[in-house]
Image: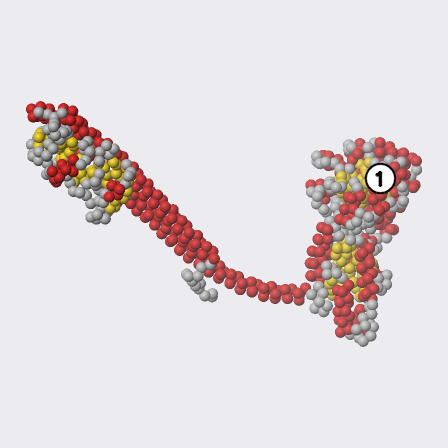
Amino acid sequence: MSPPLERDPVSLTSPQVGVALFALLLLVAVWLFTLLQLHERREQTLDTQAVALSNLSFTVAENLEQVLDRARTLRALIHDKGGLSPVTQTTDMAALMLADSVFSRLSLYDHDGNLVYTTGSGSRQRLDLDLLAAEGGRQPSVLRALPQVAMDEVGSLPLLLPAGTAEQGCCHLLLDLNLGYLLNLYQRLDLGEQASIQILTDRGDTLVQVERGGLVRSEGHFDNSLILRSRLHEGHFSAVDLTNSQVFMSLFHRLNAFPFVVVMRQAEHEVLALYREQRAEHILIVLLLSLVVVIGLVWLLWMMHGREEQLCALERSEQRNQALLNTLRLEHQQTLEAASRDPLTGLYNRRLFLELAHSHLLGSKRQGRFTAVCFIDLDRFKAINDTLGHKVGDRLLQAVAERLTSLLRETDIVSRFGGDEFVLMLTGVKQRADIEEKVGQLVRELSAPYAALQGSALSTSPSIGVALSPQDGMDIETLVKHADMAMYKAKQSGRGQYALFDTAFNAPDADAAHLARLLPAAMAAGQIQVHLQPRVALPGYEPTGFEALVRWNSPEFGLLPPAQWLPVAESLALMPDLTEWVLERVCHQLQQWRTEAVSVLPVAINLSLSQLQVPALAQQLDAVITQYDIDPAWLELEIREQDLETLQTEQIAMLQGLQQRGIGLTLDDFGSRGVSLDQIHRLPFSRIKLDPSFLRDIRNSFDDNILLSATISLAKKLQLQVAAKGVETPDQLVYLKLAGCDEVQGHLFSRALSVEEVRHYRQHPGQVVYG
């Protein structure tokens, strides 16, 4: 049992560090953004309140100027009268004061400060000479506020103005401004809990200070020197309360015509009260979000750390499992090697050879290459084994295996089936001649003396049978069987010989006389079959027609090729009957295609010389065409080149008549007899089919067969179509395409097919049918 996983909460992997840094950077960015937003909101709040206070100060200054303008108006009235008699003064001034709610009392004093006239009781009988001296030094038209303490006034603000000359009997006008009027006026303004309106003189003295609680007569607790030094008409600044060090927003506004300054003040903490509440809520939200992010980050790092540990544990487990699998695979390979190798020679045994050969055979089919299977049997091996002993026989088998391995390529397959039997597969062979050359070399090398055996020159010779794919078989079992049969044929020829498989080996007892006795009954019993081999167009590979080929499926000898029994049929004069039967089968197939609504492709039938010499051949063709109601163009006739020399004038005329009916004529095996194209051009042929001998030496170069290129070129000039049969390799196909060949036929595309296989081929025309 594996130990429990241990987590180290300190150590972090690169992805975990990256996630942590990203989260921290995100938090820093959020906090920076939050602080910037809060700072901007604070400044915005202060600016908004500053604008509001500035508007208030402007309103108060305007109102105060209006009040002071009324004081100057009263002074102007007195000045214009040139002095007042007591009776006139009493009547006019009393009426004026009763009509004015701003000033509570009006008093006139002479040059020495003695009271001359007053509209109400409680006036001082004499002004302070120091005040008058100070007043005398000013401009005569300047209004001045007197200190309330000096005047013993509580509810009013004394305002002193020059009113006339000494000859007029009065020089000074003292107006008591009703502070209740100002209080009633300013309390209507929306002031905060810690806001105030302060009226200063040009010397910085506080005349009036209005707060939310009412009038304040104190001098205030602020340093106003900044206002006095400033030359600005209005402005704002921060002031500090000297008693509690509290910061106030301060805005001042100078009156235009009077030596007074209106100052608005409000505590900053009161202005920012709502801002601080919003800031606290905002910071709380960001704190909560940050806490969530931190908790999520810690949880994510913990999970990633745990997952990393699990992955590491899984990787260690996979490494252990992989090591175990490698051990098992090595043991299995050793076991398989022991079971797949011949213990004496180290070559493949029968089972592994069949597996490897099957795989290589499929690859050769796709590439269109020849594949050869060689079956080797050592001559006189039993005698050597019996006379010199099994030890010498074993050493001889080992020496033969070494020579085979050295002579063959790495892609070839060498095996020992048992005893003195060796089986080889030669892969990727391009030409049949290459196989014969290689097999001849094997015979020579294996027949050479083995000087290292028994201290003297011991020699033996091989008998080799060769089977080729695809013509001798498309599966490895068939090829081995046919190579074995060819090996026995080579032994019959003597020692140190090789033989290529021939289909005649399938029926060693099927002589001509025996076949002659069986053929008539076979035709009656339906053992003769018609197979169709496709013909495709270049370069598109579309099917353009079929060639009808006859096969004899004998119960005694198996499937016999035409070359073995057609000469017997011709010698028995059975070819006319056979031709008529083949013709009917082909026409029946054409009629069936038309009934099934399948596109009809022409089918070619081979005619021998004896069939051409039948006088009623044309009538026979017309009858079967009429019987099955088919188009004559669906039929094609192929005549071999070797039969042209014996054609008579009547037979040529018959061929011309068939061509005029629409039946196609093809010259088969062109090039086998040396007939010129000029002779063929005068005959009614529309197509020539090249003899397979043209293709034997073609590898992969356009110059491999100059004669073939010239033949195709000349045929095209004579308006003849060119077809090639026996195409088995891609090199041959490429060359024919480059040379301009119209159609090809061969095992590279498909073997001859039965009727059922033709139906499947028509549904899948691009599929190659082997076997």
Residue holding disc 1: 715
In which quadrant of the rendered view does residue 360 lie?
Answer: bottom right
Classify mark 1: helix, strand or loop: helix
- Image position, residue 447 (x, y; %): 83, 66
In the drawing, does residue 160 fall left or right of residue 44? left
- What amino acid does circle 1 point to? Ala
- The residue located at (77%, 37%) in the rendering is 602
- Image position, residue 544 (x, y; %): 76, 39
- Is residue 550 in sight in this rendering? no
- Image position, residue 354 (x, y; %): 71, 59
Out of 765 and 541, give the one closest to the viewer: 541
Out of 582 and 16, give the one closest to the viewer: 16
Colour setting: secondary structure
- Image position, residue 252 (x, y; %): 25, 38
Which residue lies most toward the front here? 167
- Is residue 276 in sight in this rendering? yes
The relative height of residue 511 versus residue 377 in the rendered view (above or below) is above
- The residue located at (85%, 37%) in the rendering is 718
The relative height of residue 455 versus residue 527 in the rendered view (above or below) is below
